[in-house]
Image (spheres, rainbow, N blue to C red):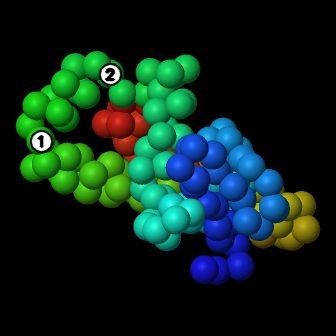
């Protein structure tokens, strides 16, 4: 267990107990821990069986009640075609999420570089042409990254 990982025990009465903070927690509180960048591990209090996956699916399902994350026809297809389709979906979703995070990170870095160029232009007035040219390149790169992000969002249905 890493320093950032929170160990949670799940009891037979379905209560979840956070050993790190010595208190019971809800599924929403687990979601909030994850949003804060914490890793969670949920184990059965009696058997020590790892219940992390199934509990995180429950967290998503609780959110599904409010947002309709996955369309009904898609869920029907996922159930209908069984494990083969589920494995494909798992791999596709994982790959798409990694790509989307990478593109977002690159876009943020591009914006940071672009902002830094504005500061440099004021600091080095005798090199006006170079920062303007570089700023144009960064803007084109940023536009390209935004377009890639839009394409990913379309593929994910966001």
Choose the circle earlier in sequence order: 1 or 2: 2
In the rendered structure, the answer to whether residue 126 lies left or right of residue 53 reads right
> Is 155 in front, or is 68?
68
Mark 2 crowdedness (10 Å alpha carbons): few <14, some 14-19, many ≥20: few
Pick whichever, 121 or 100, lies toward us.
100
Which residue shows up at 56% across the image and 44% down it? 14
Towards the viewer: 85 or 1: 1
Residue 124: give x, y in percent of width and height. Answer: 86, 70
Q: Is residue 32 at least partly visible in the picture? A: no
Residue 60 visible in image: yes
What residue would you read off at disc 1? 82
Estimate the x, y position of residue 104 in percent, counting from the top left: 54, 52
Which residue is drawn at the image coordinates 35% and 55% (left, top)?
94
**Which quadrant of the figure has residue 36?**
bottom right
**Which dot marks residue 47?**
none
Q: Is residue 138 above or below residue 26?
A: below
Q: Name the side, left or right, on which 152 lies relative to 84.
A: right
- Whether 92 is drawn above or below 8: the answer is above
Image: 137 above or below 85? below
Rendered-image quadrant of the N terminus: bottom right
On residue 71, the disc is: 2
The secondary structure type at the circle numbered 1 is helix
User: The residue tagged with tag 2: helix, strand or loop?
Assistant: loop
Q: Where does residue 23 sit, x and y in percent of width and height? A: 80, 54
Q: Are marks 1 and 2 in contact (CB under 8 Å)?
A: no
Distance from the alpha carbon under mark 1 to that under mark 2: 17 Å
Where does the C terminus fall, quadrant-wise? top left
Image point (17%, 33%), residue name? 79
Which residue extends farthest right? 123
Residue 21's place in the image compared with 66, above or below, is below
């Amino acid at each position: 267990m890493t320093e950032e990982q929170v160990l949670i025990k799940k009891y037979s009465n379905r209560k979840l107990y956070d050993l790190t903070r010595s208190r019971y927690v809800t599924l929403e509180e687990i979601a909030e821990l994850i949003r804060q960048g914490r890793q969670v591990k949920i184990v059965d209090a009696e058997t020590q069986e790892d219940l992390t996956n199934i509990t995180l699916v429950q967290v998503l399902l609780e959110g599904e009640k409010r947002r309709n994350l996955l369309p009904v026809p898609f869920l029907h297809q996922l159930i209908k075609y069984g494990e083969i389709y589920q494995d494909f979906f798992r791999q596709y979703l994982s790959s798409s999420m990694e790509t989307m995070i990478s593109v977002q990170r690159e876009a943020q870095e591009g914006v940071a570089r672009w902002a830094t160029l504005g500061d440099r232009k004021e600091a080095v007035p005798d090199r006006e042409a170079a920062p303007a040219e570089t700023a144009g390149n960064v803007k084109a790169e940023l536009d390209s990254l935004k377009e890639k992000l839009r394409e990913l969002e379309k593929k994910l249905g966001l």
